[in-house]
Amino acid sequence: MTPHSLLTSSTSTGLENTIHERGEYNARPSVLEDIGAIAASMRPADQREVRLLSGQGPLDALTQSFVHSSVTRTLSYKDQPLIMYGTAEFQPGVGIVWGLGSEALDDHVVGFLRMSRPEVEILQGSYSMIFNYVHADNDLHLKWVKFVGFNLFDPMTHESGETVIPIQRSN
């Protein structure tokens, strides 16, 4: 283990620091090495969404998300990172939730779904509300956010000019 693998994002004590295992899947606090693993094979839909909504590439988007989030976690299959996700504080009590996956995630849909609900509870943490925007063309992502308890709102035009669907989940 390198010194960097011990560095996780800044979090408070609590569930965000736990390791959640189910079979050969595990979810744990993210480490720096996860960024490169996910960025190198990020799902095309996630790359497109990141590029259109933030103007960033996979490596920059994951790095910025890791650095600025209060919680960052990684779901892996047999130690292969599949997706990184987290929550950044927007204002007291309100967080911005995010998730970016590798192409390998598509081969692990059932495992991902089984791990999702408890992991979203960790992302929610003590925030009374978490939110973000999903590109209107990202049908798979929209189905998933509904599955884990987000409310979807009417499409709107993002500042980038792209059509997005606001999502929100409250305690």
Image (spheres, helix red, strand yellow):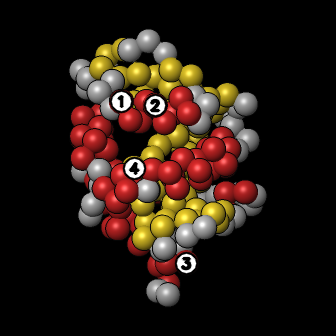
Q: How far across and down, in percent of the image, does residue 141 sit?
A: 41, 36
Report whether 42 appears left or right of 34. left
Q: CA distance from mark 4 to mark 3?
A: 21 Å
Q: How far across and down, in percent of the image, does residue 79 sit?
A: 48, 74
- The disc labelled 3 sits on which kind of residue? Leu
| Residue bearing mark 4 | 100
Picture layout, residue 151 above or below residue 68: above
Q: CA distance from mark 4 to mark 2?
A: 15 Å
Is mark 1 in CB contact (under 8 Å) with mark 3? Answer: no
Helix, strand or loop status at disc 1: helix
Q: Which of the two labelled residues, at mark 3 and mark 2, occupies the earlier sequence position?
A: 3
Picture layout, residue 161 above or below residue 63: above
Q: CA distance from mark 3 to mark 2?
A: 34 Å
| Residue bearing mark 1 | 139
Rendered image: mark on residue 6: 3
| Residue bearing mark 2 | 143
Q: CA distance from mark 2 to mark 1?
A: 6 Å
